């Protein structure tokens, strides 16, 4: 379920103010060519709810497909590097670092993904892609033990995916 936030009158934008649309309302990629390079960092987080028995199987490395968290870490990093291929208006950016951190609780796993770049645009979409793909990989790795007798997933769900923080610092203070 996706929660939408209502915009107040102050936050609503007209088509002329939106950066991903032309004056005619057509979508376009934002031209960032004249922007200076900046050091940028974004952190996103999300969680997957699982049965406690599944969490124990992950902790004890008893999942038939292999090491769940190691595989999810690789998936998250790959997703970060390929965000520009799946989000239509994202620019291809130079990723300088990706950090993943898994926290296991009794009935959930939280994944935090921090992404760093030096470039002309931010990396929050990359962090979000890392989180969602990493959590999807967890689901894929444990789906055989998460299914109920009818083949459904009543206890499994990915939730609370969000950007926790984003930072921007000029890369070359003496530059243009």
Image (cartoon, grey):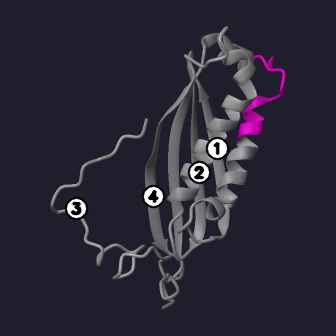
- Disc 2 packing (10 Å; few <14; some 14–19; many ≥20): many
Q: Position of residue 176 (x, y in %)?
A: 48, 91
| Mark 1 vs 4, N-terminal side | 1
Q: Which mark is residue 11?
A: 3
Q: What whole-number distance in Å separates the C-alpha atoms at marks 1 and 4?
A: 20 Å
Tell me how far mark 3 sits from mark 4, CA to CA. 20 Å
Mark 1 → mark 2, Cα distance in angstroms: 6 Å
Is disc 1 in contact with disc 2, using a CB cutoff of under 8 Å? yes
Q: Find numbered disc 4 in the image and state the secondary structure of the residue it sits on.
A: strand
Give the quadrant of residue 58. top right
* Residue appearing at x 77%, y 36% in the figure: 70
Residue range of the region highlighted in magenta in the rendering: 60-72
CA distance separating discs 2 and 4: 15 Å
Q: Is residue 20 above or below residue 64?
A: below
The answer to whether residue 97 shows anywhere in this view is no
The residue identified by callout 4 is: 166
Q: What residue is shown at x 29% (from left), y 47% (from top)?
A: 5
Query: Callout 3: 10 Å neighbours few (<14), some, many (20+)?
Result: few
Q: Are marks 2 and 4 in contact (CB under 8 Å)?
A: no
Image mark for residue 133? 1
Which of 98 and 74 lies nearest the eye of the viewer?
A: 74
Closer to the camera, 35 or 65? Answer: 65
């Amino acid at each position: 379920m996706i929660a939408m936030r209502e915009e107040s009158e102050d936050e609503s934008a007209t088509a002329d103010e939106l950066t991903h649309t032309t004056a005619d309302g057509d979508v376009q990629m934002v031209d960032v060519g004249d922007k200076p390079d900046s050091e940028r960092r974004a952190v996103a987080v999300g969680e997957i709810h699982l049965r406690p028995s599944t969490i124990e199987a992950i902790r004890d490395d008893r999942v038939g497909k292999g090491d769940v968290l190691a595989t999810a870490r690789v998936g998250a990093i790959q997703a970060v590097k390929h965000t520009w291929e799946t989000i239509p208006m994202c620019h291809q950016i130079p990723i300088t670092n990706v950090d993943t951190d898994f926290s296991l609780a009794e009935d959930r796993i939280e994944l935090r993904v921090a992404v760093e770049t030096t470039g002309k645009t931010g990396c929050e979409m990359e962090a979000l892609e890392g989180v969602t793909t990493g959590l999807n990989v967890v689901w894929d790795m444990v789906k055989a033990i998460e299914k109920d007798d009818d083949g459904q997933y009543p206890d499994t769900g990915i939730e609370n995916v969000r950007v926790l923080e984003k930072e921007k610092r000029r890369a070359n203070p003496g530059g243009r």
